[in-house]
Image (cartoon, rainbow, N blue to C red):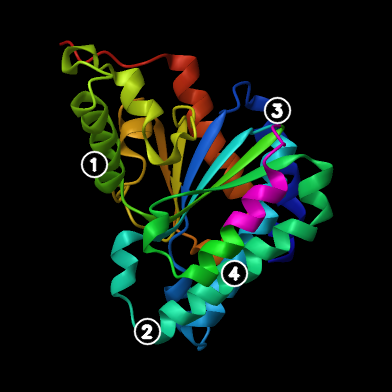
Amino acid sequence: MILRSLLEPIYFRILRSTITHIPTHIAIIQDGNRRYAKKMGQKTGFGHSQGANTTETMLEWAQEFGIKHITLYAFSTENFRRSDEELAELFELFKDRFLKVITDERVHRNKIRVRMVGDKTLLPGDVLACVEEAEKATKEYSNHYINVAIAYGGRNEIVHAARRLVSQVRAGTLRSDEITPAMVEENLYGGLGLPPVDLIIRTGNEYRTSNFLPWLANGNESSVYFCAPYWPQFRKIDLLRAIRVYDQRRRSGPKSSCP
């Protein structure tokens, strides 16, 4: 263990020196909070709280590497099926962390814009109020973007975009044959204008992307990095290894689907 702690900084510097291309937009599926809590002999809320702490630290690493957009998969539409006790814990955690944004000097010093990606109509009113306060407090910033996916589902997102376009067709302001992929992107949740995803990271030793940002990620053929650590155990070296996957793909160029 001592030897590892001595060698890891050296390995980190060597690995960092080999990376040329840094992704603009990273999407992270923060998996393993509950399993981490179980492993530590703690209740589920402990895992979610530790995961939230890891998120704050990871965002500092991302700024250090020069990553402009981070989208975090915090709570899916399917997560509403969890127990009332766990939902209450999660909603309190969301309220706490969004309100913290308002007074966090790091957010204002680095001009980080915080936004929610998801179906706001599904959130309890008190949670939504905290989300909107954080969005309001950072709406003028543009150096970095933190997009928190809550009440989010990839298919649901595309359905919402389709509904907006259909309503324009019915109103006579748009013809169906005028609809383009760019228009669909413009009508994704809230019209936030998220850029294509360059890299997806999933922790917790799960090998699937779970319907996360399908239009922006799958449509962009983003790089994907799966790793074993539960989210609360995610380290700076893990983020750098993920970036290396993106860098290697950029160096080799896109793979052709032709034989």
Q: Earlier in the sequence, mark 2 or mark 1?
A: 2
Q: Earlier in the sequence, mark 1 or mark 4?
A: 4
Q: How far across and how far down the image is residue 72, in percent? A: 50, 50
> Considering only vertical position in the picture, is 113 above or below 259?
below
**Which is nearer the eye, 30 or 184?**
184
Q: Secondary structure at mark 1?
A: helix
Is residue 227 found left or right of 77 in the rendered image? Answer: right
> Considering only vertical position in the picture, is 253 above or below 124?
above
Q: Secondary structure at mark 3?
A: helix
Q: Earlier in the sequence, mark 4 or mark 2?
A: 2
Amino acid at dot 1:
Val
Is residue 131 found left or right of 178 in the rendered image? Answer: right
Magenta range: 132-142
State how far apart marks 2 and 1 are (Cα).
27 Å
State how far apart marks 4 and 2 are (Cα).
16 Å
Amino acid at dot 4:
Lys
State how far apart marks 3 and 2 are (Cα).
47 Å
Image point 47% across, 29% down: which residue? 198
C-beta proximity under 8 Å, tags 3 and 4 = no
Image point 75% across, 47% down: which residue? 9
Return the residue at label 3: 17
Return the residue at label 2: 84
**137 falls in the magenta region:** yes
Amino acid at dot 3:
Ser
**Which is nearer the eye, 178 or 73?**
178
